[in-house]
Image (cartoon, helix red, strand yellow):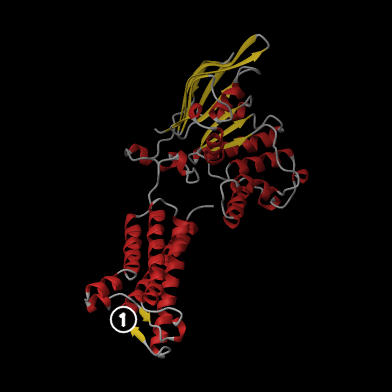
């Protein structure tokens, strides 16, 4: 079973004047995927401090806390903030809703920090509000909602980025019995769906739904009970990696293992880029070596000094002018291939479209000029058709990549 969080001999010390207070004192704990852990104990026993350590809100004074294989004590504040926003959902005793935003807008807030598109974000937020039975209250402001409804909005907000683990600190502490029961039922349903949950609570209903209970006293675990076994998915039983435990998609590359783009697509882009760029060099090789076949092989059009369009250039200058654009576009396409391989695919896809369109357009203009004899001395080479084909191929490749990405987005939930 994959671990989401591991706590090893964690100690969190504070100083109250000359007195040293150990809010968490040598706690060792593992939270596997799919667990539902309830943390109980009297006030001041270290429950919230332990939750803050697991949620990357604080660092241990000694010992180690590992989230998704990343030791929090070794990470920068920016990295910790990224982990909090992309892999962890938080629910608090107080709702912390923004009073000027509607319910659906409040749910969307964390998603904006992950650069999600507004349309997808709103759709996901509405699905979550429907899940907590508040779809008809989506456009209500917080002051128009009851306490139980506000907590359900806060719960939906915690789930907007599809976290791997949900941390809740007294989520029913300010609710009446009926509302607390609704929250407890939602937690149970989420856990049955595979979400890992850690909840600090005094609620008998929440502890009754938990799979495991630990009792804290003076910052130490003094008792632990397993109420029911963890659900084991078919993937785990078969020994296959469970994708739900993987670091979420929105974790940036600096904090997760690099996901490479398709080598086949990147290779095709490189070949097309080389194809286009070669036309800037081969005409000169042919001219200097005296082989007219090479000279005629890939250069699209050469304008000479008698042509009114380029009469300010003479001789070789006109040839260089003609060869610059395929050189630049070809090198840009090779750069786009590297970006695609490094998984910067959005800019790579649109670069292919722009480069392919430019190549096809310029080649098309050359074809038009040749066909209409716009210049008295235009040297027609075979390469105009080859470059036109390369441009169309690159354009089609870019369009197919964009369409394929759109299809994948529609299939993904939220």
150 lies left or right of 402 = right
35 lies left or right of 233 = right
Crowding near pointer 1: few (<14 within 10 Å), some, many (20+)? some
Where 166 sits versus 364, above or below?
Answer: above
**Residue 304 screen position, x and y as percent:** 38, 83
Q: Nearer the viewer, residue 4 or 322?
A: 322
Q: Is residue 396 visible?
A: no
Image quadrant in which you'd find residue 265: bottom left
| Residue located at (62% from left, 40% from top) | 155
Where 142 sits versus 184, above or below?
Answer: below
Q: Nearer the viewer, residue 321 or 16?
A: 321
Q: Is residue 41 visible?
A: yes
The N terminus appears in which quarter of the rendering? top left
| Residue located at (42% from left, 51% from top) | 343
**Residue 39 screen position, x and y as percent:** 57, 24
| Residue located at (44% from left, 61% from top) | 349
Residue at disc 1, secondary structure: loop
Q: How many marks?
A: 1
Image quadrant in which you'd find residue 352: bottom left
Where 230 sits versus 21, above or below?
Answer: below
Check disc 1 and report the residue beneath it.
381
**Residue 190 screen position, x and y as percent:** 54, 40
275 lies left or right of 149 = left
| Residue located at (52% from left, 39% from top) | 87
Q: Nearer the viewer, residue 156 or 117?
A: 117
**Residue 53 screen position, x and y as percent:** 55, 26
């Amino acid at each position: 079973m994959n671990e989401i969080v591991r706590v090893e001999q964690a100690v969190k010390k504070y100083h109250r004047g000359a007195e040293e207070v150990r809010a968490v004192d040598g706690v060792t704990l593992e939270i596997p995927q799919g667990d539902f852990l309830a943390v109980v104990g009297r006030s001041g026993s270290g429950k919230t401090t332990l939750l803050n350590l697991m949620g990357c809100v604080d660092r241990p004074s000694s010992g180690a806390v590992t989230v998704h294989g990343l030791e929090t004590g070794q990470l920068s504040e920016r990295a910790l903030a990224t982990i909090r926003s992309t892999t962890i959902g938080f629910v608090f005793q107080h709702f912390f809703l923004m009073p000027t935003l509607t319910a659906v807008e409040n749910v969307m807030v964390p998603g904006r920090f992950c650069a999600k598109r507004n349309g997808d974000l709103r759709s996901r937020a509405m699905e979550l509000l429907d899940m907590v039975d508040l779809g008809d209250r989506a456009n209500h402001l917080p002051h128009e909602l009851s306490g139980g409804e506000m907590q359900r909005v806060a719960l939906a907000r915690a789930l907007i980025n599809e976290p791997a683990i949900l941390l809740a600190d007294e989520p029913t502490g300010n609710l009446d019995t009926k509302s607390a029961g609704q929250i407890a039922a939602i937690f149970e349903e989420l856990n049955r769906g595979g979400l890992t949950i850690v909840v600090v609570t005094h609620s008998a209903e929440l502890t009754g739904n938990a799979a495991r209970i630990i009792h804290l006293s003076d910052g130490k675990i003094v008792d632990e009970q397993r109420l029911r076994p963890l659900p084991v998915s078919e993937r785990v039983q078969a020994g296959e990696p469970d994708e739900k435990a993987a670091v979420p998609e929105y974790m940036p590359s600096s904090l997760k293992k690099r996901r490479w783009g398709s080598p086949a697509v990147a290779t095709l882009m490189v070949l097309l880029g080389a194809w286009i760029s070669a036309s800037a060099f081969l005409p000169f090789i042919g001219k200097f070596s005296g082989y007219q076949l090479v000279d005629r092989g890939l250069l699209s059009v050469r304008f000479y000094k008698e042509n009114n369009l380029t009469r300010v250039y003479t001789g070789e200058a006109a040839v260089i002018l003609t060869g610059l654009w395929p050189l630049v576009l070809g090198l840009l396409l090779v750069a786009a291939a590297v970006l695609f391989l490094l998984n910067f695919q959005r800019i790579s896809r649109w670069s292919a479209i722009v480069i392919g369109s430019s190549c096809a357009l310029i080649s098309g203009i050359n074809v038009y000029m040749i066909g209409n004899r716009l210049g008295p001395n235009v040297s027609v080479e075979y390469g105009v058709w080859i470059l036109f084909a390369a441009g169309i191929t690159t354009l089609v490749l870019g369009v197919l990549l964009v369409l394929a990405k759109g299809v994948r987005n529609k299939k993904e939930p939220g």
